[in-house]
């Protein structure tokens, strides 16, 4: 079992993440950049090296022991991850390099095949660039039009506008489950119900949701769900796209090459069954296997505990930031509507300066537009500082963050 007992003893849990046990600039590391990528537990690192040390071979091809083992582990991880996100059928889970590739796959394969002049794609203004730019590329080539669900002053989507935005031309609604820039949790079920009324498909960008809460793609009622392994204790370059079987079967391949064919002729080829039709070339075998280990790890800790812990940290951090004063926090004020991401500005201090000062104290946060420039435009700013929590963070980490911000305040003066 990956977790030492007791299960959520913070010190024991933290000790399983080797990268957290280091000093930066002479200070113990406080890692609060989890929305960008999470650290990896030893259990996942062991799964990665075990594959390379013992089973390294290509999948689905060789009739030899190592290839058999690699294939069993690779396909076993697919079954694990499919179950992890509530899919009914593991063939509906396509391995990708992460969320970005998963969305590009749908935009390119489904979009290029289906969209035409005047069709509409509905996005939201709090999307990550990964859920905007692929649609712009396909819109430009097909003549489709992009529309946006706007947000209010707290960064919540204005769903009252949906009946007007959803028309008989709407083919796709693509929204994030949780915003990386504000932490807003979107009511996906409500959005899918309304989208279905006009016959539109729904793609959910789950990059910030799958690491932090139990996701059930069937309950959400969406048609596609994209996620990244590296934000959920898994390796970089791993992740997936879940899609409804009938849709994936009707879509043309995304890339051509080995693995995705049934037969190849001089002029024409035929395709393998899903999910292999979308997995051209040698996949990230080690990454998929280690992502399976990450799913086991998170299951073992338990999402109820992870969510509860992150909420406690969020609540504690917001209170302490309020006490410190001079800080503007963006995003919903109701904790039920947000996740463990705190995006903030501090008077005249540029977010990059805040981040640099914190870094000199061993505290890692993010500063910038967080690949969400439409969010920044909405609030009339160019950047925010962002602290984001995960299961291994503690109130001590929050205290260190507050101390660091107090020193920023001293340097820049009161806001
Ligand atoms: N969507 C959201 C909401 C994200 O937070 C991210 C990563 N910051 C992405 C998409 C892109 O994920 P990746 O870079 O792993 O493909």
Image (cartoon, grey):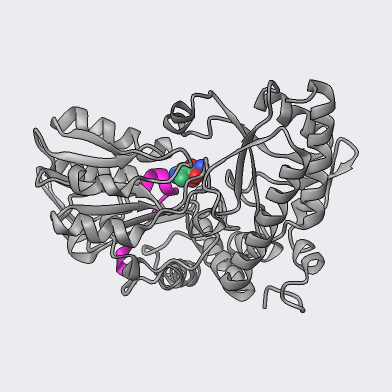
Residue 414 is left or right of residue 160, and the answer is right
Where the C terminus falls, by quadrant?
top right
The total of numbered circles placed on residues is 0
Instruction: Write the start and end of the magenta stretch as one range.
Output: 91-102
> Residue 88 placed where, x, y %?
32, 75
Above or below, 412 against 313 in this view is above
Q: Looking at the image, can residue 106 be seen?
A: no
Residue 325 is left or right of residue 122, and the answer is right
Q: Residue at x 16, y 47 (%)?
A: 171
> Is residue 96 rendered magenta in the image?
yes
Q: Looking at the image, can residue 332 be seen?
A: yes
Q: Closest to the observer: 155 or 14?
A: 155
Q: Closest to the observer: 353 or 57?
A: 353
Q: Residue furthest right?
A: 26
Q: Residue at x 30, y 51 (%)?
A: 258
Residue 146 is left or right of residue 83, and the answer is left
Q: Closest to the observer: 267 or 214?
A: 214
> Residue 352 placed where, x, y %?
67, 25
Where the N terminus falls, by quadrant?
bottom right
> Residue 102 placed where, x, y %?
36, 49
> Residue 197 placed where, x, y %?
15, 58
> Is residue 240 rendered magenta in the image?
no
Above or below, 367 against 389 in this view is above
Q: Closest to the observer: 198 or 25?
A: 198
Q: Residue at x 56, y 56 (%)?
A: 335
- Choose top left, top right, bottom left or bottom right for residue 117: top left
Above or below, 346 against 298 in this view is above
């Amino acid at each position: 079992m990956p977790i030492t007992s007791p299960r959520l003893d913070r010190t024991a849990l933290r000790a399983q993440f080797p990268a957290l046990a280091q000093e930066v600039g002479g200070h113990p590391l406080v890692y609060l950049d989890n929305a960008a990528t999470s650290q990896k537990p030893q259990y996942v690192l062991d799964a990665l090296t075990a594959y390379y040390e013992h089973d390294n071979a290509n999948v689905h091809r060789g009739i030899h022991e190592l290839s058999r083992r690699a294939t069993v582990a690779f396909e076993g991880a697919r079954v694990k991850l499919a179950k992890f996100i509530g899919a009914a059928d593991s063939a509906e889970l396509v391995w990708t390099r992460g969320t970005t590739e998963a969305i590009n796959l749908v935009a390119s394969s489904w979009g290029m095949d289906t969209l035409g002049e005047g069709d509409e794609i509905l996005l939201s203004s709090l999307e990550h660039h990964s859920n905007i730019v692929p649609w712009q590329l396909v819109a430009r080539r097909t003549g489709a039009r992009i529309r946006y669900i706007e947000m209010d002053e707290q960064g919540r989507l204005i769903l009252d506008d949906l009946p007007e935005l959803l028309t008989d031309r709407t083919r796709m609604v693509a929204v994030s489950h949780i915003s990386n820039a504000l932490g807003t949790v979107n009511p996906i079920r409500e959005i899918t119900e309304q989208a279905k009324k006009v016959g539109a498909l729904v793609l959910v960008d789950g990059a910030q949701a799958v690491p932090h809460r139990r996701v059930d793609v069937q309950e959400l009622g969406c048609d596609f769900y994209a996620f990244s392994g590296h934000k959920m204790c898994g390796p970089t370059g791993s992740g997936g796209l879940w899609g409804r079987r009938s849709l994936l079967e009707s879509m043309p391949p995304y890339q051509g090459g080995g693995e995705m064919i049934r037969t190849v002729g001089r002029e024409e080829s035929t395709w393998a069954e899903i999910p292999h039709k979308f997995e051209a070339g040698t996949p990230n075998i080690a990454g998929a296997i280690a992502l399976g280990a990450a799913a086991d790890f998170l299951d073992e800790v338990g999402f109820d505990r992870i969510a509860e812990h992150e909420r406690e940290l969020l609540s504690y951090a917001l209170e302490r930031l309020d006490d410190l004063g001079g800080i503007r926090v963006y995003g919903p004020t109701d904790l039920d509507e947000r996740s463990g991401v705190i995006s903030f500005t501090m008077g005249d201090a540029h977010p990059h300066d805040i981040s640099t000062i914190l870094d000199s104290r061993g505290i890692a946060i993010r500063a910038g537009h967080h690949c969400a420039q439409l969010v920044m435009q909405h609030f009339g700013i160019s950047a925010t500082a962002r602290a984001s929590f995960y299961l291994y963070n503690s109130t001590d980490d929050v205290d260190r963050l507050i101390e660091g911000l107090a020193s920023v305040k001293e340097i820049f003066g009161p806001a």
